[in-house]
Amino acid sequence: MIDLYTAATPNGHKVSIALEELALPYQLITLNLQKGEQKTPAFLKINPNGRIPAIVDRDEDNFAVFESGACLIYLAEKTGKLMPTDAKGRSRVLQWLMFQMGGIGPMMGQANVFYRYFPEKIQPAIDRYQGESTRLFRVLDGHLADNEYLAGDYSIADIANWAWVRTYKWSGVSVDGMPHLKRWMDAIRSRPAVLKGIEMPPSSINLNTDDEAKAKEFAEQARKLIETGRFGNSSL
């Protein structure tokens, strides 16, 4: 049994999607970020960095894993699924996983901060992070022109990147003119485990919403969390 400590963010949903895809039994433990539950002494014993997601494998002497990418690798290696075991195949998956961890996530996260959450609009910063997010999207689109998935078969690399890319509107980024990226996004969204995973837990807002009032309210809550240091800039 896996205990999943999480919240409704792209990083959190990466792990819940993987658990659903792997059909591993898990207990969902949703942390209230607004109340700072990710900073309690009990949770800091699991993740000293005080961020979600984190997992605890009860079947392995309550072994704890934090950082979403590390959680994905652990689960894939535990089950022998969603990542090849040969060196080259494994490396291809890890390359695209690191692409998300070091690029897509941080750039979209910063775009969210400057486009959605900061009370004042710093246009050069908005342009910088939206522009870099768009560039990374084009890298994905170009690669997917000749590949059904990012690293051979469907893998944790696809899960990690999709969980972020699907929220492109929230970052103020467009996927127009990227047909291969759109095809890949639609294919992954059609998977039953993915649809269930993004509801574990459900978000209080559709990050692709056109409801400006709801978007503004959600952004205000996120801004307060950032100001208090309760989650990192790339969490939402």
Image: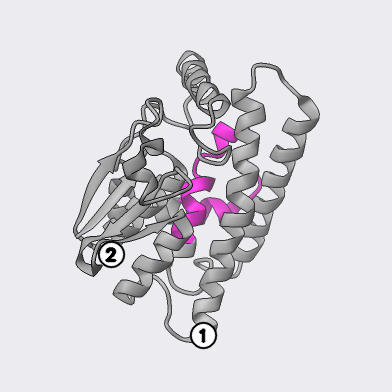
The answer to which of 55 and 150 lies nearer the viewer is 55
Q: Is residue 138 left or right of residue 97?
A: right
The earlier-in-sequence mark between 2 and 1 is 2
Local packing at callout 1 (Cα closer than 10 Å; few below 14, some 14-19, many 20+) is few
Magenta stretch, main secondary structure class:
helix
The amino acid sitting under disc 2 is Leu
Tag 1 residue: 87
Q: Residue at x 44, y 57 (%)?
A: 159
The answer to which of 48 and 58 lies nearer the viewer is 48
Q: CA distance from mark 2 to mark 1?
A: 21 Å
Tag 2 residue: 22
Assess whether mark 1 and mark 2 are in contact (beta carbons under 8 angstroms): no
Local packing at callout 2 (Cα closer than 10 Å; few below 14, some 14-19, many 20+) is some
In the picture, which quadrant includes the N terminus?
bottom left
Q: Residue furthest top?
A: 213
Q: Residue furthest front?
A: 41
At which x and y percent is residue 164? 51, 46
Q: Secondary structure at mark 2?
A: helix
Q: Residue at x 56, y 41 (%)?
A: 234
The answer to which of 61 and 172 lies nearer the viewer is 61
Q: Is residue 126 left or right of residue 22?
A: right
At which x and y percent is residue 104? 61, 50
What mark, if any, has residue 29 been given in the picture?
none
Q: Secondary structure at mark 1?
A: helix
Q: Residue at x 52, y 18 (%)?
A: 220
Vertical placement of 67 versus 172: above or below? below
Residue 191 seen in the current view:
no
Residue 181 seen in the current view:
yes
Q: Is residue 88 magenta?
A: no
Q: In the rendered structure, which segment of residues is drawn in magenta? A: 158-185
